[in-house]
Image: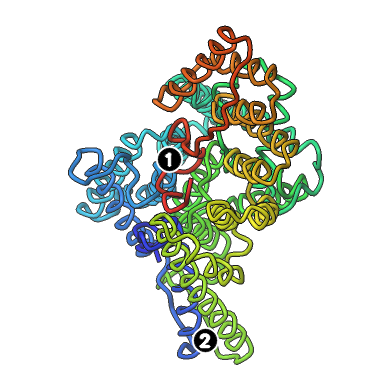
Amino acid sequence: MCGIALFAYSHRFVNAWVTPKWLGVMALAGIAGIIWSVFGKKWKITAGREIYAAIIIFAAALAIHGILQYAGLINSRLVSGNFDNPAGFAAALACALPLCFHFFKKDTLCYIRYAAFFAAAIMTLAIVLSGSRTGILAIAVVAMVWGASETRFSGFAKWEKIGIFRFWRRAKIIALGVAVAVFAIVLYFLKKDSADGRLLIWRTTVDMIAEKPVFGHGHGAFLSKYMLYQAAYFDANPDSRFAQLADNVLHPFNEYLLVLAQYGIAGLGIVALAISLILRTYRRNKTDEKLPAMLSLLALAVFSFFSYPFKYPFTWMMLSFCIAIICAPAIINQKSKTFAIKNRNWVPRLAVFLLSAGLLGYTAMLTRAEITWKRIAMQSLAGKTEKVLPEYEKLYRWLGRNGLFLYNHAAELHEAKEFEKSAATFEKSTRYFNDIDVQMIIAANFKELGKNAEAERHLKTAAAMCPARFMPLYELVNLYSAANRKDEALAMAQIIINKEVKIPSPTVTAIKNEMRQLIEAKEATDGPENDNRTSDKPENDGTRQGETPETGAALPP
């Protein structure tokens, strides 16, 4: 499972880096459950050092992959291993690195200790080279806490006898807090614009939370609703300093805010209760094997404040494994260091068999649907849109709740000039996924259907979602010109000319030149000509925050 969760990828899927990992882990879980329920009566699964060592080996291999990418020996524009971006890469390494600490003890064999030092060093180097500030912060916090805990148990026990241990402990906690705060401030200024962009996302997410604070907006609501709140914010604050930083957003870059937005205080309360129970269990029965597991959970906790580690299966695996190590000491045989799993009762065996078989069957069908989606999306890009439309309908059984799939299908219907069907499909899509691209094509559908008022409303929403974008304003000029609303078209053209450029591109330059020509024609003839031209080309490579361009590479514009 570690190998698949860290290294699996395939361009046969729309998301070549994330989807294969999840499907592979799900398939292995189903197979393992079936084997256990059919053949196992009593299993002994090695715990602790051996599993730690296996995870470290896989993580070290991932780190070497990233280092080779940085050196240019493996072709990649990012240091991200086999992940879609550096965030997932750094999250995997950050939660695996603390396991190395278990082998730093003096009673460990010399060559094993040196191997652990080497693995920790290359993991740290790979995280730094990836440029992930969150990853750097996570391993810094973990290292500080580990150092403080080791110092407490080994180097300063004598102070406890003379009565100043309590003072020293408080001093360490204060020093640790100050060090983490200073380090976080330094990381903030390394990429200030990116950090400010996250502040915008957090501020807007708080608005979303405030509307439904107790139980939240429901599962998956962030993808479907967040961009509407961002549009509302910029409508109310058109001169905001965040306007140039706003972009499409898929995640709040904070797992705790995501829980609050989707499940409210009730959901976050359950998470807080689980954390408190884990801490309580750890304090009651500390062992050498539990400290690395606890530090791994700490790395995930820190990472969750600034990123989206739980998008990936490896972090879920690490979460489950570390909780098992911390919370299940009673079933560990201290002599053999094994988990004894008794499996003589046919009732749990049958239940596990049925669940595992269901999971395996579901995974197989979902894999087939995902591969088919990628194939027909590529065929559509090759000009066979009308031919593949019936195949999209067949995939609804398995992908009908996937917002990106619905968006893709609706866009294909628009390309095939089936505007009514496209509009209806987009209505379904916005229940699961909504951003500036969705609003733009919805507006194009309504424009083709002659519903200019609806088209204008969606274009204004798109413009408010990402104020730095030029295309929504450009399409508004075209819409006003086509409707013979000359004064509004000229006013919008002037706004475009005066608008600051976030990312220079030929398309933006062409739009500005066209707007100047429109105004010059008005000044020359005292009556601007209507210009009904539209453009389907984005003004820049508009990557959604939290994704990379390759993730949606198989989709139409």
Disc 2 is placed on an element classified as: helix
Residue 164 shows in the view: no
Seen in the picture, residue 234 relative to 386 is either above or below; the reply is above
Residue 377 shows in the view: yes
Going by the numbered disc 1, the residue's amino acid type is Glu
Q: Are marks 1 and 2 in contact (CB under 8 Å)?
A: no
Cα gap from disc 1 to disc 2, whole angstroms = 42 Å
Q: Would residue 359 be found to the left or right of residue 453 on screen? A: left
Residue 88 at x, y = what percent? Answer: 43, 47
Q: Earlier in the sequence, mark 1 or mark 2?
A: 2
Q: Residues within 10 Å of mark 1 (few under 14, many from 20)?
A: few
Q: Residues within 10 Å of mark 2 (few under 14, many from 20)?
A: many
Seen in the picture, residue 493 relative to 9 is either above or below; the reply is above
Q: Splitting the image into 4 quarters, where does residue 482 fall?
A: top right
Residue at the spot of label 1: 150
Of residue 133 and residue 413, the one placed in the foreground of this image is 413
- Picture residue at 29% right of the left edge, 38% below the top: 125
Q: Splitting the image into 4 quarters, where does residue 359 fall?
A: bottom right
Of residue 214 and residue 519, the one placed in the foreground of this image is 519
Going by the numbered disc 2, the residue's amino acid type is Ser
Q: Quadrant of the N terminus?
A: bottom left
Residue 42 at x, y = what percent? Answer: 48, 86
Residue 27 at x, y = what percent? Answer: 46, 73
- Picture residue at 38% right of the left edge, 63% below the top: 12
Seen in the picture, residue 52 relative to 437 is either above or below; the reply is below
Number of numbered labels in the structure image: 2
Of residue 248 and residue 490, the one placed in the foreground of this image is 490
Disc 1 is placed on an element classified as: helix
Residue 209 at x, y = what percent? Answer: 75, 38
Q: Which mark is residue 37?
A: 2
Of residue 238 and residue 197, the one placed in the foreground of this image is 238
